[in-house]
Image (tube, rainbow, N blue to C red):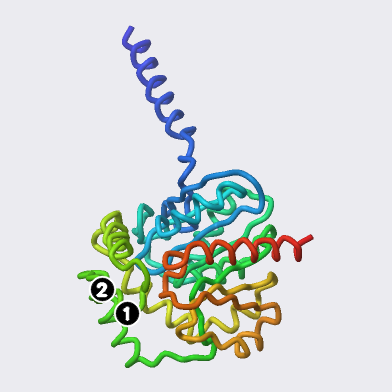
Amino acid sequence: MKRKGFFLWWCVIALILLGYGCAKEPENIAISSDGIEISFDQQGVGEPTLIFIHGYANIKGIWDAQMTHFAEKYRVVAIDLPGFGESGFNRADWTMAAFGQDVNAVIEKLNPEKVILIGFSMGAPVIIEAAKQAPENLIGLVLVDEINNIEMEYSPEMLAHMDSVFMDIVTNPTNEKLLAGGFYKNNPEASYERVVSMLSVHKNTSRIGWRESFYEIFRWLNEDCIEALKQIQVPIISISSDTPPTNVEAFEKYVSSYKLKVIPDVGHVVMWDNPEEFNRLLEESIQEFIGESE
């Protein structure tokens, strides 16, 4: 009897372990190459699949209006990059290349027929790095208000000043600071409430990796940007504000397919300040990418 009981006990343990081993990964989670959970939301059906990447200290919710609008026609996906929002943050590598691999982990999980990547602010270097890793189904990149002057170099003094400004804003945000920094221009009260709401939902409340990510953006812009762009095999379109102006000629030296679409009289978060025009220009860009891929 003792042997029988012992045998049954181990059968129960084996079944439990088997159940854990067969448990499915949650539908809205992908696993990065270094084991970090990447949270994403998706809506809608239809191709191409649009994948939206947020900027520094933002979350996927920054794209809520675009997710709702474009889900009527396409499958749309918004990702929380590691360290931000609901994604994991226990990692050592906070490079743009690592973030690019995170985006491709989501693409691999979803396995779409065609993909367009849309990256706002820090998200622009991220999608360029993702494109460098050459997912075969990628048909275009949209850079949202980032890389205005591809040949600009950021000095250590500039970075030290910007670090103090950025960290102060994300630690102690006020409407006045965000307006002065040009983050938004229109509907300031509503936009300020959205910023405060976004900052409150980060799982990474200790802000692990935030300073590393900040410095990595500008290291990438100084050292890696031009060479990375030379490797991109799909068309690139920027949708940007008119301040500061974008140096189109400098960009075209390295990306012959580059196009710029400008939204005047808006702040950095162009998709908040003029969502109707942003959505129109993004839809126009999507159709251009589709046409060039056929």
Element marked by disc 1: loop
Residue pointed to by mark 2: 169
* Residue 253 placement, left or right of 127: right
Q: Quadrant of residue 59?
A: bottom left
Q: Quadrant of residue 81?
A: bottom left
In this rendering, is residue 40 above or below 218?
above
Q: Amino acid at mark 1?
A: Gly
Count neighbours of disc 1 (C-alpha within 10 A) and say few if under 14, some if 14 to 19, many if 20 or more.
some
Residue at image point 42% right, 70% down: 269
Q: Which residue is more in the foreground, 45 or 114?
A: 45
Q: Amino acid at mark 2?
A: Ile
In this rendering, is residue 202 above or below 238?
above
- Counting the numbered discs, the total is 2
Residue at image point 26% right, 61% down: 196
Q: Residue 152: percent from the left, percent from the top?
A: 49, 91
Spatial separation of the CA atoms under disc 2 and disc 1: 9 Å
CB of mark 2 within 8 Å of CB of mark 1?
yes
Which numbered circle lies on residue 181? 1
